[in-house]
Image: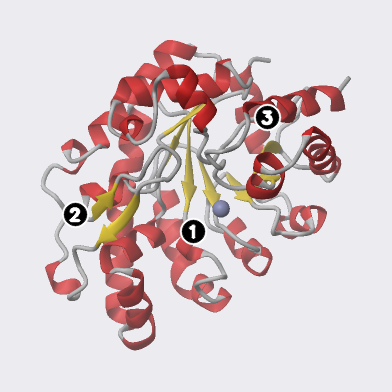
């Protein structure tokens, strides 16, 4: 069984010889940027550098897949958001929003797939495939429709419309969903095996479980139903209250953080409808923990039935290569 077969089977909940270990969230770290010469912020806009940095986490750390890009702003930028490209250890962020005035002006760019950094990401998927071949999974990352909608409107307006103008709230969500569908299908056309979709604004930290059920779940379902390949949904924070609804969003798998305290309980809640990737703490274990901690957390996750051993959220840029290598070694040791 090669790495790609193992990962695809694990995502579907089919039997595998061992649980795959990789990251479905952001993978770039400063140590690898220095080793490869492919550093943030340049690597966000340069297909060769984006590829070199992604491939390093496979070649150097041993993660069983390659993933790009390293931010949640590519589609937002193409849709008209202003982006601060960040620094070597700070991710790009949205600093200005095109549709704060209301939904009447919503307009899809004429050539969305040729706009901003989208061509860079599409090119990177092809380059990554050339570098790693057919046996290693190529994962594309992109922001989900809820996060995109809030980037287009600004979080402030997005929340205001939710309370005071539910029709406008729905309109901007639908608009964002349309863009996500077009972009996601292009990512598959460019060679992605799987798309990983962090949608942090859908977190119970920001939106109530009720709003998830009523507004966000139908949008996420429509997104998944109209995309041609398998996707993983990542929502930040303690998603325990919305796990069953997330399992109903028609994604193949869920990626969860360690903030979901009870992984066994989470597996029971999703009841075989989806598999679960995670849930090794990015800040506390991979960034700040030592070898013992990485091992202990990995064994616990494997013991509790994790389907893909992975960081719980985006890897912090200051994370040492050694801890990512230990994550892989821990999985190997578990089966030895
Ligand atoms: Zn997260």
Q: Residue at x 24, y 49 (%)?
A: 77
Q: Is mark 1 within 8 Å of ligand 1?
A: yes
Q: Is residue 29 above or below residue 178?
A: above
Q: Mark 2 or 1 closer to N-term?
A: 2
The residues bearing labels 3 and 2 have C-alpha atoms spaced at a distance of: 36 Å
Q: Is residue 283 above or below residue 235?
A: above
Residue 289: x, y in percent? 74, 42
Disc number for residue 21: 3
Secondary structure under tag 1 reads helix
Q: Residue at x 55, y 51 (%)?
A: 234
Q: Which residue is mark 2?
A: 80
Q: Mark 1 or 3 closer to N-term?
A: 3
- Locate residue 238: give its quadrant: bottom right
Q: Residue at x 14, y 60 (%)?
A: 107
- Locate residue 246: give its quadrant: bottom right
Disc number for residue 200: 1
Residue 276 in view, yes or no: no
The residues bearing labels 2 and 1 have C-alpha atoms spaced at a distance of: 20 Å
Secondary structure under tag 3 reads loop
The residues bearing labels 1 and 3 have C-alpha atoms spaced at a distance of: 23 Å
């Amino acid at each position: 069984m090669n790495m790609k077969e193992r990962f695809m089977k694990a995502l579907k909940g089919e039997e595998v010889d061992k649980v795959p270990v990789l990251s479905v969230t952001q993978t770039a770290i400063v140590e690898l940027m220095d080793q490869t010469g492919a550093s943030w912020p340049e690597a966000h806009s340069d297909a060769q550098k984006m590829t070199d940095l992604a491939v390093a986490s496979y070649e150097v750390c041993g993660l069983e897949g390659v993933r790009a890009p390293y931010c949640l702003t590519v589609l937002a930028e193409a849709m008209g958001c202003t982006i601060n490209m960040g620094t070597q250890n700070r991710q790009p962020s949205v600093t200005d929003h095109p549709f704060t005035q209301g939904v009447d002006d919503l307009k899809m760019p004429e050539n969305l797939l040729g706009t901003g950094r989208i061509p860079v990401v599409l090119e990177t998927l092809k380059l990554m495939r050339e570098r790693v071949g057919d046996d290693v999974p190529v994962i594309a990352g992109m922001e989900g429709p809820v996060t995109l909608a809030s980037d287009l409107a600004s979080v402030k307006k997005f929340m205001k419309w939710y309370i005071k103008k539910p029709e406008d709230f729905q309109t901007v969500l639908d608009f964002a969903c349309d863009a996500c569908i077009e972009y996601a299908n292009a990512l598959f056309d460019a060679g992605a095996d799987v798309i990983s979709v962090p949608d942090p604004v859908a977190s119970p930290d920001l939106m109530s479980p009720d709003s998830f059920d009523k507004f966000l779940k139908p949008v996420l379902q429509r997104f998944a139903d109209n995309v041609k390949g398998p996707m993983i949904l990542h929502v930040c924070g303690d998603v325990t209250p919305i796990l069953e609804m997330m399992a109903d969003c028609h994604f193949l798998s869920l990626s969860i953080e360690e903030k979901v305290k009870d992984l066994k309980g989470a597996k029971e809640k999703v009841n075989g409808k989806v598999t679960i990737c995670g849930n090794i703490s990015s800040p506390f274990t991979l960034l700040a923990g030592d070898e013992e901690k990485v091992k202990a957390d990995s064994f616990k996750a494997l013991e509790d039935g994790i389907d893909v051993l992975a960081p719980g959220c985006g890897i912090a840029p200051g994370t040492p290569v050694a801890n990512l290598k230990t994550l892989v070694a821990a999985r190997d040791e578990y089966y030895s």
